[in-house]
């Protein structure tokens, strides 16, 4: 009788252990403990584009922005760069804004710079990402398309890009000469030389949805 009781007690312990392990396995398999893959997408109407042009031989900076930019062909990705890859953009040059208190600079740029180019109602292009996560933009301006390599910084839901646009790559030197002539006095430095640089720094900020 004593042996029977020991056997029964042993079976109860085995059953209890088995139930505990089964319960633990079921808990581990519940959806709450499973990791969901994160994806990113571009926040509509969040992208901001700015530029820095330069005048005089001392290379004095003149900054500006474009108030409008339209993005198309946006997608989703495991990273912000992947979400942006293949995104196309279109910028109306009429949305130029340089915050000039006199109100004369923007009309001059539109007339004597963009106005002497071909098909310049819009600046358009496409964002590209390579396999090593380097990125660039193809930009179409003055009837020409050329590439601008970009450097970028990233946070969880924000990407910032910087690049240099050399206007000779878009046959833009005639436009540079035109705006320099129109602004000759304003672009003359202490050395008496009037100069407008063909190098323009470009910057963009993009906000992301984390899904």
Image: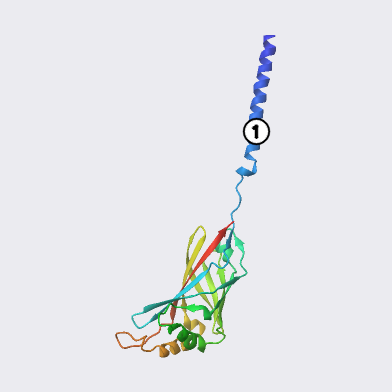
The image quadrant where one finds the N terminus is top right
User: Could you say where residue 114 lies in the image, as x and y percent from the top left?
Assistant: 50, 85
9 or 68: which is nearer to us? Answer: 68
User: Could you say where residue 51 lies in the image, as x and y percent from the top left?
Assistant: 45, 75
Res. 42 image quadrant: bottom right
Residue that sits furthest to the front in the current view:
102
13 or 183: which is nearer to us? Answer: 183
| Position of 8 relative to 203 (above/below) | above
Q: In screen coordinates, is 125 left or right of 181? A: right
- The structure residue drawn at horizontal position 38% and vertical position 89%, both measured from the top left corner, is 184
User: Could you say where residue 203 lies in the image, as x and y percent from the top left?
Assistant: 47, 71
Residue highlighted by disc 1: 23
Is there any visible trace of residue 195 in the rendered image? yes
The image quadrant where one finds the C terminus is bottom right
**CA neighbours of label 1 inside 10 A, class few (<14), some (14 to 19), many (20+):** few
SS assignment at label 1: helix
| Position of 51 relative to 184 (above/below) | above
Res. 123 image quadrant: bottom right
User: Could you say where residue 39 lies in the image, as x and y percent from the top left?
Assistant: 59, 57
| Position of 11 relative to 180 (above/below) | above
- The structure residue drawn at horizontal position 52% and vertical position 78%, both measured from the top left corner, is 95
């Amino acid at each position: 009788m004593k042996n029977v009781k020991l056997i029964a007690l042993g079976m109860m312990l085995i059953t209890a252990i088995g139930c505990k392990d089964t319960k633990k396995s079921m808990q581990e398999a519940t959806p709450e403990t499973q990791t969901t893959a994160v994806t990113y997408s571009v926040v509509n109407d969040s992208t901001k584009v700015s530029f820095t042009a330069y005048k005089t031989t001392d290379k004095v900076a003149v900054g500006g922005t474009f108030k409008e930019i339209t993005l198309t062909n946006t997608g989703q990705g495991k990273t912000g760069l992947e979400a942006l890859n293949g995104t196309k953009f279109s910028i109306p040059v009429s949305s130029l804004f340089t915050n000039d208190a006199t109100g004369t600079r923007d009309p001059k740029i539109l007339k004597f710079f963009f106005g002497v180019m071909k098909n310049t109602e819009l600046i358009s292009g496409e964002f590209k990402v390579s396999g090593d996560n380097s990125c660039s933009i193809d930009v179409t301006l003055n009837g020409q398309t050329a590439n601008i390599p970009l450097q970028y910084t990233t946070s969880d839901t924000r990407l910032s890009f910087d690049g240099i646009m050399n206007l000779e790559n878009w046959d833009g030197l005639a436009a540079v000469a035109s705006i320099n002539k129109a602004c000759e006095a304003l672009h003359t430095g202490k050395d008496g030389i009037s100069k407008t640089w063909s190098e323009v720094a470009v910057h963009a900020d993009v906000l992301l949805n984390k899904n």
